[in-house]
Amino acid sequence: MSDPFADRPLPRAPLRGAVALALFTLAAVAFVRVTGIGAVVTPPAPVVAERELRFEDRPAGGVAVYDARDGTLVELLTPGGDGFVRGALRGMARERRSHGVGAEPPFRLAAHADGRLTLEDLATGRRIDLAAFGPTNAGAFARFLKPRDTAQVSLKE
């Protein structure tokens, strides 16, 4: 079989137009990212409850969760359980290692007025919006808020 388009060259005008459009789009995005002109920024909702936490690995595979302000034990995670909490913390720990930060600086768990729950690494500035992973996964962290603060938090689906 022969190729019906073998003798027909690719039209240059549409090809040049497509390349120009792609380059313009890249330049426009770079301009907005660098200057901030034209960027839409949604201000964060106010925080209604927060707690600074430290997470410490235990020899048997558990994880101890401490209140960073007074050093009280909030909860002891059993080995093999709480997969979402462990996964989120692994990602944050990897970020800390890349910045040369140890385990001592606390994390801030914050519940916002709009129902979002965020976990922020105070040492690196990285923030995870836990509500993006669904109410069940966000609830895995919401239990670390103080009991009086938990009553104010409603995790939206």
Image (tube, rainbow, N blue to C red):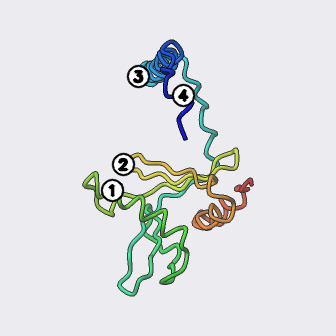
Q: CA distance from mark 1 to mark 2?
A: 7 Å
Q: CA distance from mark 2 to mark 3?
A: 22 Å
Three-letter residue code for mark 3 = Val
Residue at 70% from the left image edge and 44% from the top image edge: 114
Q: Name which of mark 4 and mark 1 comes first in the sequence.
A: 4
Binning the other alpha carbons within 10 Å of mark 2 as few (below 14), some (14 to 19) or many (20 upward) gives some
Marking on residue 34: 3
For the residues labelled 2 and 3, say whether their Cβ atoms are less than 8 Å apart.
Answer: no
Residue 150 x, y percent position in the rendering: 67, 61
Tell me if 20 is positioned left or right of 147 in this view.
Answer: left
Three-letter residue code for mark 2 = Thr
Q: Name which of mark 3 and mark 1 comes first in the sequence.
A: 3
Tell me if 98 is positioned left or right of 139 in this view.
Answer: left
Q: Name which of mark 2 and mark 4 comes first in the sequence.
A: 4
Residue at 33% from the left image edge and 62% from the top image edge: 104
Q: CA distance from mark 2 to mark 4?
A: 56 Å
Binning the other alpha carbons within 10 Å of mark 3 as few (below 14), some (14 to 19) or many (20 upward) gives few
Answer above or below: position of 64 versus 142: below
Along the line of sight, which residue is nearer the eye, 28 or 44? 28
Which residue in the protein does label 4 denote? 5
Q: Which structural element holds mark 2?
A: loop
Answer above or below: position of 29 versus 103: above
For the residues labelled 1 and 2, say whether their Cβ atoms are less than 8 Å apart.
Answer: yes
Residue at 63% from the left image edge and 40% from the top image edge: 46
Which residue in the protein does label 1 denote? 96
Q: Name which of mark 1 and mark 2 comes first in the sequence.
A: 1
Q: Residue furthest top?
A: 13
Q: CA distance from mark 4 to mark 1?
A: 56 Å
Q: Which structural element holds mark 1?
A: helix
Which residue in the protein does label 2 denote? 124
Q: CA distance from mark 4 to mark 3?
A: 44 Å
Q: Residue furthest front?
A: 1
